[in-house]
Image (spheres, rainbow, N blue to C red):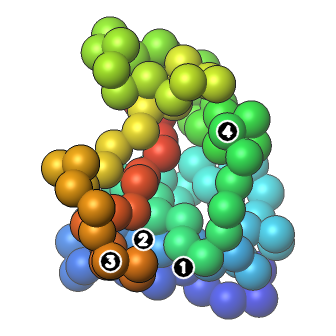
C-alpha cells in the first residue's frame, strides 16, 4: 500500500482514502477492521452494489430488521442521516447520508 490508513481516534476507527482503497486486498480490509473496529471511507462515492460487495468481504450482510433504514435498491444496506428532514444549506454535514451494513 502506498499510504497508511489514518486513525480516527487514538483507540477506535480508521479512515481509508480513495487512493488507499485501490491498493488494498481483501485481507487488508479485514485486518483494518480487526485492528480498529470501524472503517470510514471518505472521498469516494460507492454505488450500492459496490458498497455491498465491499461489506461482504467481512461476511454476508444481513437485511436490517428496521425497514425504514433499508436502502431502497439494496436492502442489505442501511441509510443513516443526521438531518431531521429540514432543508439544509449545501455543504452542511448534517445533510450527509451514511450508507453501511451490519
Which of the 4 image quadrants contains residue 22? Answer: bottom right
Mark 1 or mark 2, earlier in chain = 1
The residue that mark 3 highlights is 89
Mark 3 or mark 2, earlier in chain = 2
**Residues at marks 3 and 1, CA–CA distance in whole angstroms:** 31 Å
User: Could you tell whether 75 is left or right of 85 in the image?
Assistant: right
Q: Nearer the viewer, mark 3 or mark 2?
A: 3
The residue that mark 4 highlights is 48
User: Which residue is drawn at the image coordinates 54% and 72% (left, top)?
Assistant: 42
Which one is in front, 64 or 83? 83
Mark 4 or mark 3, earlier in chain = 4
**Residues at marks 1 and 2, CA–CA distance in whole angstroms:** 6 Å
The residue that mark 1 highlights is 5
Mark 3 or mark 1, earlier in chain = 1
**Mark 2 falls on what kind of element?**
strand
C-beta proximity under 8 Å, tags 1 and 2 = yes
Q: Which residue, as the protein is rendered here, is positioned at the far front?
A: 87
**Residue 51 circle label:** none
**Mark 4 falls on what kind of element?**
helix
Q: Nearer the viewer, mark 3 or mark 1?
A: 3
**Mark 1 falls on what kind of element?**
loop
Question: What percent of the width, then of the height, locates residue 36?
Answer: 37, 62
Mark 4 or mark 1, earlier in chain = 1
**Residues at marks 2 and 4, CA–CA distance in whole angstroms:** 21 Å
Which of the 4 image quadrants contains residue 7? Answer: bottom left
User: Which residue is drawn at the image coordinates 66% and 69% (left, top)?
Assistant: 44
C-beta proximity under 8 Å, tags 3 and 1 = no
**Residues at marks 3 and 2, CA–CA distance in whole angstroms:** 28 Å
Question: What percent of the width, then of the height, locates residue 57?
Answer: 67, 37
Q: Nearer the viewer, mark 4 or mark 1?
A: 4
User: Which residue is drawn at the image coordinates 29% and 15% (left, top)?
Assistant: 66
**Residue 14 circle label:** 2
Amino acid at each position: 500500500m502506498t499510504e497508511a490508513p489514518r486513525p480516527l481516534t487514538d483507540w477506535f476507527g480508521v479512515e481509508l482514502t480513495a487512493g488507499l482503497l485501490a491498493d488494498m486486498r481483501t485481507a487488508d480490509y479485514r485486518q483494518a477492521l480487526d485492528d480498529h473496529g470501524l472503517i470510514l471511507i471518505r472521498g469516494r462515492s460507492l454505488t450500492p452494489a459496490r458498497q455491498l460487495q465491499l461489506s461482504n468481504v467481512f461476511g454476508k450482510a444481513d437485511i436490517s430488521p428496521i425497514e425504514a433504514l433499508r436502502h431502497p435498491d439494496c436492502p442489505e444496506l442501511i441509510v443513516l442521516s443526521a438531518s431531521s428532514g429540514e432543508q439544509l444549506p449545501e455543504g452542511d454535514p448534517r445533510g450527509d447520508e451514511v450508507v453501511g451494513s451490519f
